[in-house]
Image (cartoon, grey):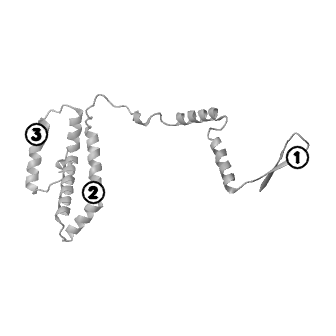
Amino acid sequence: MSRSKKARSGGNVDVVVVRNRTQSDVEGRLRKREKKRKGLKTGARNSEAKAQKQQSAGQKQDPRLGSKKKIPLVVEAPKKLSKADRRANAEKELEMLENDAQLNVLLDRLDNGDSLGAGLQKYVDEKLERIEVLMKQLGLYEEEPAEEECEEEVVETAPKKASKKVATDDDLLSQFEDLDLNQFKG
């Protein structure tokens, strides 16, 4: 599209200058205009500073600083569990082993006469040994010797327990928990 521009001259004659803009002229002018606008927008100094302050307050200052978790300077020895706590832990572990689905399936297979592989047999043996240890610890495990031997053991063990001097409450509690009431039945 052509552009007409009136030129002023000393006289009353109006001279009209006509320019034809080609596509390359238009693109050149646009590029020149874009080059002129390289800087920041007006008033950007204040608005950007506020935005940066808000961002820095919300995020961590330096990610290289690491954790703020306190590290103990002296390592304390783990506290020993009391008799009641050990008993409760043993009961929980025994209950978990008794409710173990995989162990129950393997025991059913053994009862049916199936043979297990070496790894599975080892797993079953370990679990059964652990159950036996826990039952002995809790006083639930009962071996079934002949009746005569059982009566002799009861007679022999009763005087030994009476002759011991118990020092603490924990020992009294363990003695009471281990007490077999069947020996007093007639």
The residue at the far right in this view is 12
The three-letter code of the residue at mark 2 reads Glu
Disc 1 residue type?
Answer: Asp
Residue 160 circle label: 3
**53 or 105, which is in the foreground?**
53
Q: Is residue 32 visible?
A: yes
- Where residue 163 appears, as percent x and y from the top left, is 11, 35
Q: What residue is disc 2 on? A: 98
Direction from residue 78 to residue 57 in the image, left or right: right
Name the image quarter holding residue 119.
bottom left
Whichever of callouts 3 and 1 sits on the residue coming sooner in the sequence is: 1
Q: Is residue 14 left or right of residue 165?
A: right
Residue bearing the label numbered 1 = 14
The quadrant in which the N terminus is found is bottom right
Evaluate whether residue 67 shows in this view.
Answer: no
Few, some or many C-alpha atoms within 10 Å of disc 3 (few <14, some 14-19, many ≥20)?
Answer: few
Residue, x 21% and y 32% (percent of image)? 168
Judge depth for marks 1 and 2 and give the one in front. Answer: 1
Is residue 149 shown above or below 179?
below
Q: CA distance from mark 2 to mark 3?
A: 35 Å
Residue appearing at x 25%, y 36% in the figure: 80
* Extreme residue toward the bottom, this view: 113
Question: As drawn, is 57 to the left or to the right of 179?
Answer: right
Q: Position of residue 59 (x, y in %)?
A: 50, 37
Distance from label 3 to label 1 (Cα)? Answer: 138 Å
- The mark nearer the N terminus, 2 or 3, is 2
Amino acid bearing label 3: Lys
Residue 65 placed where, x, y %?
Answer: 40, 33
Residue displayed at 60% across by 35% down: 48
Q: Position of residue 19 (x, y in %)?
A: 76, 52
Viewer-proximal residue among 49 and 138:
49
